[in-house]
Amino acid sequence: MPDARRSNKVKPLKDYEEMLWHPEEVTVKQEEKETVSIMLHRSKIVKIRGEVTGKQYIFNGGGSIVEVDKKDVEGMMRNNRVRQSCCGSFSSPYFSIV
């Protein structure tokens, strides 16, 4: 008669050996990245502070890529508005997600 206290036992060795023979059946939980790569499109050095985390991010010129905390990305992209200049052309955005 099975004892209720023994239901939480470690899997028998036979089950472990079965996992070794069929690794495709074993699923590994992949960790989500906590950062997003952002690229600067302007030819200047930009220092910006994240609205949520308060971290300071420094972009060292056009084309530079910085890992930004996911919590701060939305605020950075909100300040990324493309504006029409006085001459009718449109300015390029400051940042893009890589």
Image: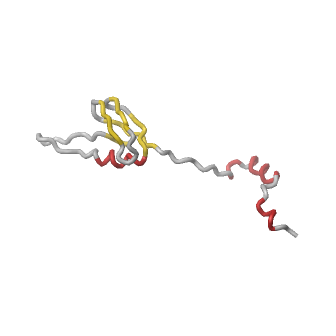
Instruction: Please determine whether, in this image, residue 93 is positioned above or below residue 62.
Output: below
Instruction: Please determine whether, in this image, residue 58 is positioned above or below residue 16.
Output: above
Residue 43 is situated, as x and y percent measured from the top left of the image, at 27, 30
Specify the quadrant that holds the C terminus: top left
**Residue at figure coordinates x 78%, y 54% from the top left:** 15
Residue 65 is situated, as x and y percent measured from the top left of the image, at 39, 34
Residue 6 horizontal side relative to residue 66, left or right: right
Figure quadrant of residue 83: top left
**Residue at figure coordinates x 41%, y 41% from the top left:** 68
**Residue at figure coordinates x 52%, y 48% from the top left:** 32
Residue 89 is situated, as x and y percent measured from the top left of the image, at 16, 41
Residue 24 is situated, as x and y percent measured from the top left of the image, at 67, 49
Residue 5 horizontal side relative to residue 58, left or right: right
Colour scheme in use: secondary structure
Instruction: Please determine whether, in this image, residue 11 is positioned above or below residue 86.
Output: below
Figure quadrant of residue 57: top left
| Of residues 5 and 24, the one drawn nearer to the viewer in this rendering | 5
**Residue at figure coordinates x 13%, y 42% from the top left:** 88
Instruction: Please determine whether, in this image, residue 86 is positioned above or below residue 2.
Output: above
Specify the quadrant that holds the N terminus: bottom right
Query: Hey, which residue is sitting farthest right in the picture?
Result: 1
How many circles with numbers are drawn on the protein?
A: 0
